[in-house]
Every structure is written in structure tokens, then in C-alpha cells.
Amino acid sequence: MPARSPAPHELAWFKSSYSGANTTECVECAHVPYGVLIRDSKNADGSLVSVKAGAWRSFVEGLRREQPVVPA
């Protein structure tokens, strides 16, 4: 019998490190066996974006290589 995928409310969601502490523009992520799920933190019961593990790894590595731009 195949393992059941956890429901979104059963996952360990974490806020993106790019989301500020006091902002309303946040995304949350949760690791799943095949990759990552992403949702709007203001709408936890809304739509989810599913990203495969390899694509997520490439995305995060790309962010780490970039230098943040700080407005003058």
C-alpha cells in the first residue's frame, strides 16, 4: 500500500527568509518527499504551488549566488 501524502495542514510550514518580520507580503514553504510546496501566508487554505526537488535546489542556489540590491 503506497504511503499517503500529508494534507497541507499536517505539514511543517516555514516563512521565507526573504519575508520581512512586519510585512504582509509573505510566502510559506513546506518540504514534501518530491520537493517543496509554496503558499501565500495570508491565505493558508488557498492554492499551493508545487516545485520538484531539483528545480527548488536550483532556485535556492541561484538566490545564494546573487548579491542583494540595497536601494540608495
Image (cartoon, grey):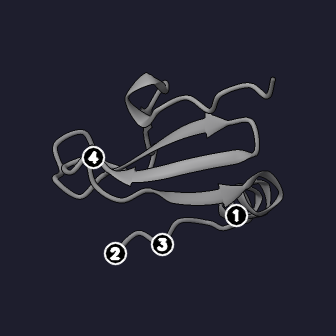
Name the residue that disc number 4 marks. Answer: 41
Q: Are marks 3 and 2 in contact (CB under 8 Å)?
A: yes
- In the picture, the quarter occupied by the C terminus is bottom left
- For the residues labelled 3 and 1, the Cα–Cα distance comes to 18 Å
Q: Secondary structure at mark 1?
A: helix
Q: Which residue is mark 1?
A: 59
Q: Nearer the viewer, residue 60 or 72?
A: 60
Label annotation for residue 72: none
| Nearer-N-terminus badge (1/4) | 4
Of pointers 2 and 1, the one earlier in the residue sequence: 1
Residue 42 versus residue 11: which sits nearer the camera?
11
Using the numbered discs, state the Cα–Cα distance from disc 2 to disc 1 in whole angstroms.
Answer: 23 Å
Decide: few, some or many residues near mark 1? Use Cα within 10 Å; few <14, some 14-19, many ≥20.
Answer: few
Q: Secondary structure at mark 3?
A: loop
What residue is disc 3 on? 69
Front label number (1 vs 4): 4
Mark 3 and mark 4: Cα distance apart in space: 24 Å
Type of residue at label 3? Val
- Can you name the residue that lies furthest to the bottom here? 72
Q: Where is residue 45 drawn, in percent x and y?
A: 26, 46
In three-dimensional space, the C-alpha distance between marks 1 and 4, rounded to whole angstroms, equals 20 Å
The residue that mark 2 highlights is 71
